[in-house]
Amino acid sequence: SAVISQKPSRDICQRGTSLTIQCQVDSQVTMMFWYRQQPGQSLTLIATANQGSEATYESGFVIDKFPISRPNLTFSTLTVSNMSPEDSSIYLCSGGGVGTEAFFGQGTRLTVV
Amino acid sequence: GENVEQHPSTLSVQEGDSAVIKCTYSDSASNYFPWYKQELGKRPQLIIDIRSNVGEKKDQRIAVTLNKTAKHFSLHITETQPEDSAVYFCAGHTGTASKLTFGTGTRLQVTL
């Protein structure tokens, strides 16, 4: 299976600022996704990162708050904009084919102060 | 859209015993059901998966069963070991949506 490198692994940010998280896959993948995981809880899908076009966002998530880029089949970024303490969470990217194994980056632990 | 429910939320078993985690899904078009194990502070890792054209799949101590009619699937771990302690997530995939919907997770504790 492919390997995803995600960075940063953790960060502490001031409220009102933005953080961009990067994910690099070691091979081309059809699908890439971004999730949020609160401590002790399940994974909530933020959006599907579409190569060369706008991401597809899930209910409750908007592009202005979580802009996503996917310039090619191996790379994607998620920006958490105008952060507040409520954005403190773990953010995970994943990649895979359609109806096949999805593998995850190591996650970014974000704390907003 | 797809809704996946998972039970129990916590499970404690003695080493050597079996553990069973159950999930139900809502979308009859779902066709792929992976199970992930997540250790504390780590990323989720796929441990086994099953497709809708198969009723059961086994890999050493781990097995998954699928009942399409009832729309539920289960993870079975036999001869549990302390290193099996983790949070386990089931998920369902609908081809039309091309995305996974995760269950709420089960925290498994294997005691000595």
Image (cartoon, coloured by chain):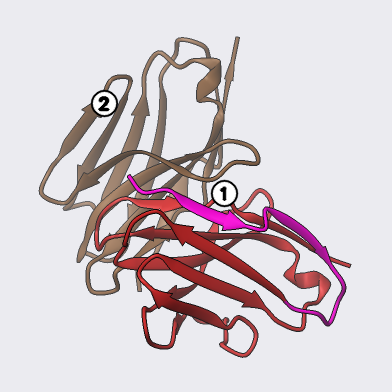
- Residue denoted by label 1: A106
Q: Is residue A74 left or right of residue A42?
A: left
Q: Badge 1, how many Cα within 10 Å: few under 14, some, many 20+?
A: many
Q: Residue at x 34, y 52 (%)?
A: B24
- Callouts 1 and 2 close, C-beta under 8 Å: no
- Residue denoted by label 2: B59
Q: Badge 2, how many Cα within 10 Å: few under 14, some, many 20+?
A: few
**Magenta region: which residues?**
A1-18
Position of residue A29 relative to residue A15, above or below, is above
Q: Is residue B44 left or right of residue A88?
A: left
The chain holding disc 1 is A
Q: Nearer the viewer, mark 1 or mark 2?
A: 1
| Letter of the brown chain | B
> What quarter of the picture does the N terminus of chain B occupy?
bottom left
Extreme-left residue of the structure: B53
Give the Cα separation between the discs numbered 1 and 2: 25 Å
Three-letter code for the amino acid on which mark 2 is drawn: Asp
| Letter of the red chain | A
